[in-house]
Amino acid sequence: MLRIVLLASALILSPAAAYAHSCPAVMAEIDAAMPAADLSDTDRERVEELRAQGEELHEAGDHDGSMAALEEAKEIMGL
């Protein structure tokens, strides 16, 4: 019974751990798309701010906040 509970807990927590570590991949996606992005100066500045905010939040351990900022940046870029 204990084995089943531990296995269930591991399966439930695995997606959260994977999601937390996807921040760097999203940052890399933004970085790769920036040079060719057709953005106004205002949008480019906002994307850069959100990208920096996402990195800061990731490093602070706030992965949900980081992903929110990074996803907003991607939305502005049309990714």
Image (spheres, rainbow, N blue to C red):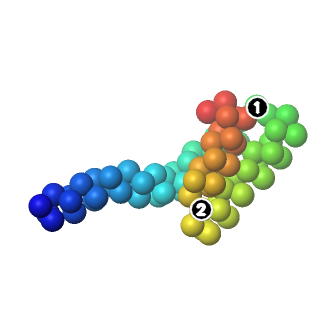
Camera sees residue 4: yes
- Residue shown at 62% from the left, 69% from the top: 60
Q: What element carries label 1?
A: loop
- Residue shown at 22% from the left, 63% from the top: 6
The number of numbered badges drawn on the structure is 2
Which residue in the protein does label 1 denote? 38
Looking at the image, which is closer to me, 20 or 47? 20
* Label 1: few (<14), some (14–19) or many (≥20) C-alpha neighbours in 10 Å: few
Residue situated furthest right in the rendering = 42
- Give the left or right position of residue 6, taking residue 30 as reference: left
- Residue shown at 12% from the left, 61% from the top: 1
Q: Give the label on residue 17, or none.
A: none
Identify the image quadrant of the C terminus: top right
Q: In this view, does 44 lie above or below 56?
A: above
Q: Is residue 6 above or below residue 78?
A: below
* Label 2: few (<14), some (14–19) or many (≥20) C-alpha neighbours in 10 Å: some
Say whether disc 1 or disc 2 marks the residue closer to the N-terminus: 1
Q: Name the kind of residue labelled 1 in the image.
A: Asp
Q: Name the kind of residue labelled 2 in the image.
A: Asp
Which residue in the protein does label 2 denote? 62
Looking at the image, which is closer to me, 14 or 48? 14
Residue situated furthest bottom in the rendering = 60
Residue 66 drawn at (x, y percent): 62, 55
Task: For the residues labelled 1 and 2, say whether their Cβ atoms are less than 8 Å apart.
Answer: no
Residue 44 drawn at (x, y percent): 80, 42
CA distance for labels 1 and 2? 30 Å
- Residue shown at 67% from the left, 64% from the top: 56
Residue 8 drawn at (x, y percent): 24, 54
Q: Quadrant of residue 52?
A: bottom right
- Give the left or right position of residue 75, taking residue 19 as reference: right
Instruction: Please state which of the two labelled residues, at mark 1 or mark 2, is closer to the viewer.
Output: 2
